[in-house]
């Protein structure tokens, strides 16, 4: 597939990033807007010359940085002056010590919720888009685009508006209305495609190879190697917020699987740099039963992830052919973790459980991670005596339809004390 590029006289300055490296064969390529290896068609990722040799100095530099992902600029493919450029500046969201939820689940080793609903467009996608924007600047793109299950569309629209790009994003036609409105409100073009996410993604792949796509930076396609690095910042923040320590266990939702693989990459980089003490950690993947190809492959002992047609309320995770699925399997097995799934009823129950215990209203993806955490404990796969971090990647206000049918007023009464007493609420 041809990839459109844009000629530019802008110096190629992306910090400590030095090359693109194939995850399969190791072949290296210059930094450019490509995403597949020319030798074996494997996925490309960023290779770095990281600032080794002075972990204490690097730790102090990070801690003195801004309260967003740019505090980790030395470890990201961004220019040194990134914090001075117009961007939505996501990150450094709350790591909530979830003692009430821990009691409900029987966790004694410390339970934390990394709540990324606090980002500018209320999902973790702001992290990955912020990195992609900086790459788009360097490569001279004029339009930002993506295929999206909802959250990414909103993040691209907001980031493009802030950074001065045109945006044109593509979504399945039947997304939750909250996500549709949020993606459209930033003034860019929003295009609904008749079909599911995989249909949208195929369309975008055709557009990239067509002259119509000239000058377009697709954040999760031709900018994907840069975009994916934004998820590493979740690993950095979690460890810094734990006092520069690795958690024993992390539960991560799976859509494409990229977030999970990049969190693992981030943890390994922190160990390599001496910013955290090396120790074993387990990574668990969480899927919705109605779109669980990775969970199914893990349970069946397979290395190949067979595509499925999604049918779940967790639409942000509804990717039936996850690109990073095989790598998720490798990481779960290497770290001693697992991949599990929960049905839609369990997702809704978990959303309410998190809201009731910790005051965090998660979108359906957060319900998946909490529900899977409970299931992993019940099945003896996750150790309740060890420290555990659960990711909530988005705001429940985006997926109201999931809980609206079973959530509402406790009672509707006349405006009198007698009516209040009669309702049994006194």
Image (spheres, grey):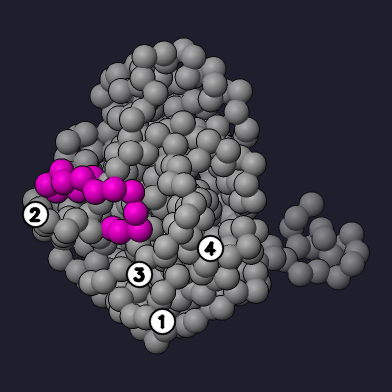
Magenta part of the chain: 21-35
The answer to which of marks 2 and 4 sits earlier in the sequence is 4
Q: For the view shown, which residue lies furthest in the right direction?
A: 416
Q: Is residue 222 above or below residue 250?
A: below
Is residue 306 visible to the viewer in this orientation of the structure?
yes
Chief secondary structure of the magenta span? loop
Is residue 373 visible to the viewer in this orientation of the structure?
no
Disc 1 to disc 2, C-alpha distance = 40 Å
Q: Which residue is mark 3?
A: 4
Which is closer to the viewer, label 1 or label 2? 1
The residue lying at 54 percent from left, 78 percent from top is 190
The residue lying at 23 percent from left, 72 percent from top is 1
Which is closer to the viewer, label 3 or label 2? 3
Q: Is residue 50 magenta?
A: no
Q: Which residue is mark 1?
A: 212
Secondary element under disc 1, as helix, strand or loop, is helix
- Kindly indicate the quadrant of the structure image that contains residue 397: bottom right
Disc 2 to disc 4, C-alpha distance = 35 Å
Disc 1 to disc 3, C-alpha distance = 10 Å
Q: Which residue is mark 2?
A: 302
Position in image of residue 251 (x %, y %): 36, 42
Q: Mark 4 packing: few (<14 Cα in 10 Å), some, or many (20+)?
A: many
Q: Mark 3 packing: few (<14 Cα in 10 Å), some, or many (20+)?
A: many
């Amino acid at each position: 597939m041809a990839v459109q590029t844009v000629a530019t006289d802008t110096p190629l300055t992306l910090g400590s990033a030095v090359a693109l490296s194939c995850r399969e064969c190791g072949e290296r390529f210059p930094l450019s807007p490509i995403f597949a290896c020319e030798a074996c068609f494997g996925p490309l990722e960023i290779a770095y010359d990281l600032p080794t040799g002075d972990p204490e100095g690097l730790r102090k530099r990070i801690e003195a940085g801004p309260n967003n992902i740019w505090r980790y600029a030395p470890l990201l493919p961004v220019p040194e002056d990134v914090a001075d450029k117009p961007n939505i500046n996501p990150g450094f969201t709350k790591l909530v010590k979830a003692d009430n939820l821990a009691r409900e689940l029987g966790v004694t080793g410390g339970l934390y919720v990394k709540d990324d609903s606090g980002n500018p467009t209320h999902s973790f996608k702001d992290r990955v888009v912020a990195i992609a924007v900086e790459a788009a600047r360097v490569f001279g793109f004029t339009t930002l685009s993506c295929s999206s299950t909802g959250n990414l569309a909103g993040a691209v629209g907001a980031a493009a508006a802030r950074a001065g790009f045109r945006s044109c994003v593509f979504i399945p036609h039947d997304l939750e209305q909250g996500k549709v409105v949020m993606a459209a409100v930033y003034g860019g073009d929003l295009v609904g495609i008749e079909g599911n996410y995989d249909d949208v993604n195929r369309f975008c792949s055709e557009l990239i190879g067509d002259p119509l796509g000239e000058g377009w930076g697709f954040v999760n396609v031709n900018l994907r190697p840069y975009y994916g690095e934004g998820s590493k910042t979740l690993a950095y923040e979690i460890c810094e917020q734990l006092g520069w320590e690795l958690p024993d266990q992390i539960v991560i939702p799976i859509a494409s699987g990229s977030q999970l693989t990049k969190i693992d990459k981030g943890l390994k980089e922190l160990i390599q740099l001496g910013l955290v003490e090396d120790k074993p950690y387990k990574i668990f993947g969480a899927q919705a039963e109605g779109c669980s190809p990775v969970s199914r492959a893990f349970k069946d002992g397979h290395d190949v992830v067979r595509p499925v047609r999604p049918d779940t309320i967790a639409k942000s995770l509804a990717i039936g052919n996850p690109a990073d699925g095989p790598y998720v399997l490798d990481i779960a097995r290497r770290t001693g973790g697992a991949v599990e799934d929960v049905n839609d009823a369990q997702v809704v129950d978990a959303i309410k459980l998190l809201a009731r215990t910790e005051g965090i209203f998660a979108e359906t993806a957060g319900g998946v991670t909490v529900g899977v955490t409970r299931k992993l404990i019940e099945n003896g796969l996750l150790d309740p005596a060890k420290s555990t971090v659960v990711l909530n990647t988005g705001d429940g206000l985006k997926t109201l339809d999931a809980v609206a049918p079973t959530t509402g007023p406790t009672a509707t009464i006349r405006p009198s004390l007698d009516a209040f007493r009669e309702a049994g609420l006194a």
